[in-house]
Image: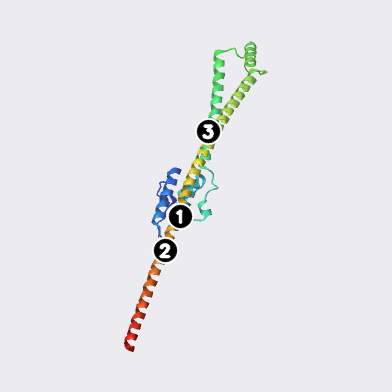
Amino acid sequence: MAQKATYYDLLGLAPEADLEKVGAAYLRLSRELAASGGEDAEVRLQQLKQAFDVLSDPVRRAAYDDGLSGQSNLSFRGELLLPGQIALGGTRRNPVRVLLSIIATLMIVGLVIQVGVMFNTYKRVNEVSLPNATAPAAEKAYLQDFYQTYGIRAASREEADLLLADMRRKEAAEREQQNQERQREEQERAQRRFEEESRRLGAQVTAANLHAEEEARRAREEEERRKEAQEKAQQDAERMKREAEIARFRSRSSLGSE
């Protein structure tokens, strides 16, 4: 049975190799193939290009890595793969998005718990420091202070406490939304940097491909010229041989006639 090889093996890379290493390995191997020539050089160049196309695309690379870890028969076998096989698993959920969703959910739950603990602590402190807080005068003073602080008139202390807890929940939700917005902006900046790097590497790869194709074309032309020269030399040798035989035949004929 033929030994299986992954796209990482084809490029001589480790699975954790970054985009720059992927591009450098592809350029190096393409140049070596173009310099060495050979009957299978074109096929191997196509295989290298397929490996680069998958490993340089984050979505396709994540799907390919998932396939390698989930099913051993998804590894690269050395032949050209169909586009549907390369993009296998592309519709799966992005693990980074799943992880970010879990982290955001845990943060929201933690904030809710924290608000609840703070609210209970606040109530206990008020009960200890103001033993008569439920008295009408104390409640009236509390409601007046609540109105001056927040600009909201509450009918009772319980309503004021509920309003205060609701405001804190809204503030926590706003902070969480701001954190998510910052994370989204950071992801967008990272994506833009990745796209710029991909374009730069793409230009290098295109130039390498053109160079490799030009070298292959020159090698073919040189081989054709060499074959033509050999054929011409062989034809000249045969022509000279025939002329020599004709000359000997004429010489013998002239001697016989004398």
Which corner quadrant of the image does residue 115 belong to? top right
**Mark seen at residue 228:** none
Q: Is mark 2 on a helix, strand or loop?
A: helix
Q: How far apart are marks 1 and 2 (CA)?
A: 16 Å
Spatial CA span between label 2 and label 3: 72 Å
Badge 1 marks a residue whose secondary structure is: helix
> SS for tag 3?
helix
Task: Measuring from the top left, give residue 211's x and y in whole percent.
Answer: 45, 52
Q: Is residue 160 above or below residue 173?
A: above
User: Which of the labelled discs sits on residue 214, or is there none?
Assistant: 1
Residue under the point 65% across and 21% down: 159
- Point out the image quarter for the N terminus: bottom left
Q: In the rendered structure, which amino acid carries the disc numbered 1?
A: Glu
Earlier sequence position, callout 1 versus callout 3: 3
The mark lying in front, picked from 2 and 3, is: 2
Decide: few, some or many residues near mark 2? Use Cα within 10 Å; few <14, some 14-19, many ≥20: few
Residue behind mark 2: 225
| Amino acid type, callout 2 | Arg
Q: Which colour scheme is used?
A: rainbow
Name the one closer to the observer, 3 or 72: 3
Q: Is residue 38 above or below residue 24?
A: below
Q: Is 155 situated above or below 185?
A: above
Residue at the top extreme?
A: 137
* Residue indicated by mark 3: 106
75 or 21: nearer the viewer: 21
